Image (spheres, rainbow, N blue to C red):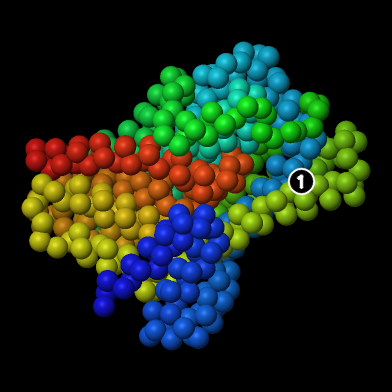
Amino acid sequence: MEFLTIIPPIAAIAVAVIWRNVYAALLVALFLSETLIASFNPGLGLLGVIDRNIAVFESSYNTQILVFCLLIGALIAFMRDSGGVSAMARALINSGFAGSRRKAELAVAGTGTLIFIETNVSLLSSGVLGRPLYDSHGLSRERLAYIIDSTSAPVSVLILLNGWGAYALGLVSAEGFDQPLNIVLGSIAWNFYAILTLALVYLTAISGRVFGPLRTADEKVSAVTEAGAEPTKAIYMWLPVVIMVVGALSFMAWTGNGNITEGDGARSILWAIALAILIAAFLLLKDKVFKSDELQDKAFQGIGEMVPMVTVLLFSIALGGSLKELGTGEFIASIAAGSLPAFTVPAILFLAAGITSFMTGTSWGTYGILIPIAMPLSQALGIPPSLALAAVLGGGVFGDHCSPISDTSLIASVASGSEHLSHVRTQLPYALATAALACVLYLVAGLFV
């Protein structure tokens, strides 16, 4: 009966593709999962849907992320409606820093690469910066979403001076290795998916060429997609963004007692976005851009714009918790841990991580399931632990890039202003092509290590 655990995520994907309604997809999958947990009782399954969504708020981390995503709307509204975004875009274009399509895309990709400490901060910063630049050069929001989504997570699993690295180190350390740090650092060179994904992002930015549905999305762009206010002062945009980034890093260092990688990422970015909003509000009131009641209305308007996407994120988190209790991830992982030729194990782990992340919508949840399996499996078969770890880390990111219920892809859609399912559909060919090449490299690595 274990095979039934994969029915809810499959149903979610099917509904999302056929109906193009991510809300219905998540709720259908959540209902099926809760019904299975309740021993096929649909009445209890329906009640379980309600309880599971409420349970999301029992985690301070989840609550902080949801509130953060709502507050993003207020900050974006302040920067956009004050004319700060338009002024920033004009300044970058006039200065020559983003005067061409290539420079604009490289500026966005570079921002996402440099802010590797926290993926949400990276997505928001590069997304907000990229909106006016992509609009001015006639580039689609789907293209922007692809660039920022395929930059933030791959960079995070390569540089590892962040929560991703700390999490991986904790999971590896629990397996009893003498030098777990060396294993984590050694995974960098083997993380083929992350390396290839970043290479493809920069190749896209430099060449300007895209393919598949993303090319169609670009061809449909004929004018500016988001009308902003008349340009005023660029400081209305860049100062809040700088405050948010610096604040997030500072709060992570503070909550980590001087060590950024041990800081509380969710709480830090929530504090940082609140601080950025306060600074932006003070600046706009001081310069008499808005009156106090107008500023309040702008804040609630921006928050309201985020409610649909935050609802999707809420349902996604609830579904992830339900699938974890159901055992979907463990079932998928057990398939990979069967009797396998040693040289195929890295590729199998990569695919297993990708499928698990795709169906559960969480790379971190995938790591918690598969790393404890991959580490002893690599030892038993004589495979370098760093290679096995890299396969799982890269596979988790791959699954996130393909999944319509992934939280990072959802936030990338929010930050870029792209319709979510359109972002997933246009990014999918890039993720699949890169993953196919990564699989070949993992097979080769399995043969020669």
- SS at circle 1: helix
Residue bearing mark 1: 278
Determine whether 31 is above or below 142 in the image: below
Query: x%, y% of residue 326?
Result: 37, 74
Q: Residue at x 52, y 25 (%)?
A: 105
Q: Residue furthest front?
A: 18
Amino acid type of the residue that numbered disc 1 sits on in the rendered structure: Leu
Q: Nearer the viewer, residue 212 or 297?
A: 212
Is 4 left or right of 95, judged from the image as shown? left
**What x and y, as percent, mark residue 94?**
68, 14
Query: What residue is rendered at 32% in x and 33% in y?
Result: 196
Location of residue 351 with respect to 14 vertically, above or below: above
Please state, as top left, top right, bottom left or bottom right, where the N terminus lies in the image: bottom left
Can residue 183 be spotted in the picture?
Answer: no
> Does 14 sit left or right of 107 as displayed?
left
Residue toward you, 281 or 54: 54
Q: Where in the figure is residue 131, as x and y percent of width and height?
A: 63, 33
Q: Nearer the viewer, residue 383 or 166?
A: 383
Q: Residue at x 57, y 16 (%)?
A: 100
| Residue 178 horizontal/vertical position (percent) | 21, 53
Image quadrant containing the C terminus? top left
